[in-house]
Amino acid sequence: MKTYQKDAVKRLFRAVSMLQNEEECAAFFEDMDEALILTSVDLSGRGMLVYDLKIPSEKVGSFDTELVEEFFRAFAVNGGITLHMRGLAGSNSHHIIEGAFKSAARSLRQAVSADSGDPDGIPSTKGVL
């Protein structure tokens, strides 16, 4: 993993660690044209990745598609997040990858969202990112 990728993972980890609340778990289905991705996150403090995405091509443009799994593994392990990713459908590598990132982001947002009874609303990442 390149230095800039490691820096991005560390910043995301700091943001996530500040946003943990009682909810902690969430799952999200993301469809991107023919691709359908399921992502589940648990802000358990026990970082691990369970990854089942079949990306048909080795590259999308100049991007090595094997880096998708490496990114999510580093993010999960360093962030103390149990992260499950499963591709349920899809044949276009770009759609699978974009769906994976969107699904992960939305399930993470749901997991760190403030409880509806919390008058303060959604926690801030000000000063973290």
Image (tube, rainbow, N blue to C red):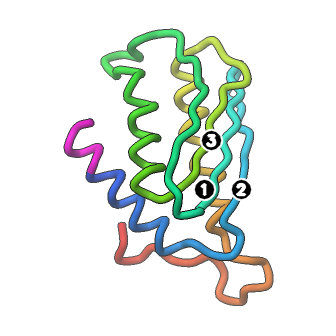
Residue 68 in the image, given as x and y percentages of width and height: 44, 31
Name the residue located 27 percent from the left edge and 36 percent from the top edge. 1
Marks 3 and 2 sit apart, C-alpha to C-alpha, by 11 Å
Q: Are marks 3 and 2 in contact (CB under 8 Å)?
A: no
Element type where label 1 sits in the image: helix
Which residue, as the protein is rendered here, is positioned at the far bottom? 119
Q: Nearer the viewer, mark 3 or mark 1?
A: 3
Element type where label 3 sits in the image: strand
Residue 54 in the image, given as x and y percentages of width and height: 58, 18
Q: Is residue 9 above or below residue 5?
A: below
Magenta stretch? 1-6
Q: Which mark is residue 45?
A: none
Q: Is residue 4 magenta?
A: yes
Q: Which mark is residue 26?
A: 2
Marks 1 and 2 sit apart, C-alpha to C-alpha, by 7 Å
Going from N to C along the chain, the mark reached first, 1 or 2, is 2
Residue 30 in the image, given as x and y percentages of width and height: 70, 37
Q: Amino acid at mark 2?
A: Ala
Name the residue located 53 percent from the left edge and 58 percent from the top edge. 46
Q: Which mark is residue 84?
A: 3
Q: Amino acid at mark 3?
A: His
Name the residue located 68 percent from the left edge and 32 percent from the top edge. 37
Element type where label 2 sits in the image: strand
Q: Amino acid at mark 1?
A: Leu
Name the residue located 78 percent from the left edge and 78 percent from the top edge. 116
Near mark 1 (Cα within 10 A), the count class, few <14, some 14-19 or many ≥20, is: many
In this picture, residue 90 sits left or right of residue 80: right
Q: Which residue is mark 1?
A: 108
Q: Are marks 1 and 2 in contact (CB under 8 Å)?
A: yes
Marks 3 and 1 sit apart, C-alpha to C-alpha, by 12 Å
Give the number of callouts.
3
Q: Is residue 22 above or below residue 84?
A: below
